[in-house]
Image (cartoon, rainbow, N blue to C red):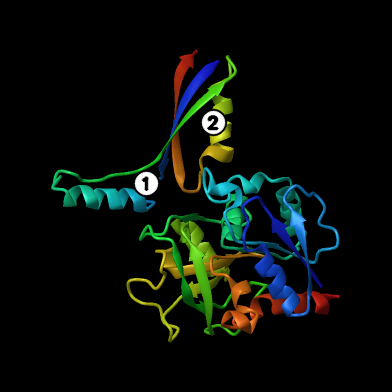
Amino acid sequence: MRFGVVRFPGSNCEQDVVHAVQHLGFEAGYVWHGDTDLTGYDAIVLPGGFSYGDYIRCGAVARFSPVMAEVVRFAERGGPVIGVCNGFQILTEAHLLPGALLRNTGLKFICKPATLRVEESVCQWLDLPAGSVVNVPVNHNEGNFICDGETLHRLRDNGQVVLRYCEPDGTTADGGSAPNGALDDIAGICNERGNVFGLMPHPERVVDPVSGGTDGQAFFIAIAERLVNAG
Amino acid sequence: MARFEIYVTYKKGIFDPPGATAERALVNLGYDEVDSVKIGKYIQLEVAAGTPVERVREMCDKLLANPVIEDYRIETVGEA
């Protein structure tokens, strides 16, 4: 089981991801943004950071990197792709996921632990029971998820809402529990098939207990087991 | 050389946090007449003479604007 972690100019979480998956006993390798060959990788990670300086819009330029055409083909073949933070922004810009991520409503860069509720979803990356509450840090300026009403209905109806920001007891507050103003408290969504998953929080930062938690482990173990079982 | 000016703004109904903040700040400064502030992007584009506006529209759809959340308006400034 080998994860390919894409490095764009301005990525800054790729080493955390590689450390996290190696800590769990899986292999990982870096994929350069100019590469066009993903042979040998079973799952692809688009890490966090500030690809291309976040110029124009977050992810808008990274989306046209040579490697992204290959990532799109990989995803269309059913290959598992996860985008964390800037990676999520890139996935929406590449139209692998619907919606967009706007500036946080408070205009502040948010860097803090977040409580997330796992929703009933088709996501292949996460196998936790619906209703589980996990602690995973967020670290972003543009995490305010938005989409049109029709898309939101589709996301809900198809089980594509994977994670919602919540209160520590798992409920969502009346005025919303998202620290960034995200629509419907959405922290992570997947595509209809469940193989492409984008989320603002950083599970790779809570894999090795030395960094303060282990709730992120489930985000990498489930997909690995699924791939191994699929042979 | 042909010149175009492009105005990128959020679509109607998309909350614009910087605009809303500027709006509140102006009201706090005593400008009670302020009803709404929207903040967008202004892009100056210079391209080869004779470039049709359709090409510019394509550039906007692909990269300069995100049609999911943004509208854009292209103004032809003329040949330089």
Q: Position of residue A144 (x, y in %)?
A: 45, 60
Query: Mark 1 — on which chain does it sit?
Result: B
Q: Secondary structure at mark 2?
A: helix
* Left or right: residue A186 compared with residue A74: left
Label 1 to label 2, Cα distance in Å? 20 Å
Residue at numbered disc 1: B12
**In the image, residue B11 above or below residue A28:** above
**Which label's residue is closer to the chain start, 1 or 2?**
1
Q: Nearer the viewer, residue A10 or A191?
A: A10
* Left or right: residue B5 compared with residue A40: left
Where residue A174 sits, quadrant-wise, is: bottom left
Q: Position of residue A32 (x, y in %)?
A: 75, 53
Label 2 is placed on what type of residue? Arg
Task: Say if residue B10 shows up in the picture.
Answer: yes
Q: Position of residue A95 (x, y in %)?
A: 61, 52
Q: Quadrant of the N terminus of chain B?
A: top right
**In the image, residue A19 above or below residue A5:** below
Residue at numbered disc 2: B57
**In the image, residue A185 above or below residue B23:** below
* Left or right: residue A141 compared with residue A229: left
Where residue A177 sits, quadrant-wise, is: bottom left
Task: Say if residue A118 shows up in the picture.
Answer: no
| Circle 1 residues within 10 Å: few <14, some 14–19, many ≥20 | few
Query: Mark 2 — on which chain does it sit?
Result: B
Total numbered labels placed on residues in the image = 2
Q: Position of residue A187 (x, y in %)?
A: 51, 68
Label 1 is placed on what type of residue? Lys
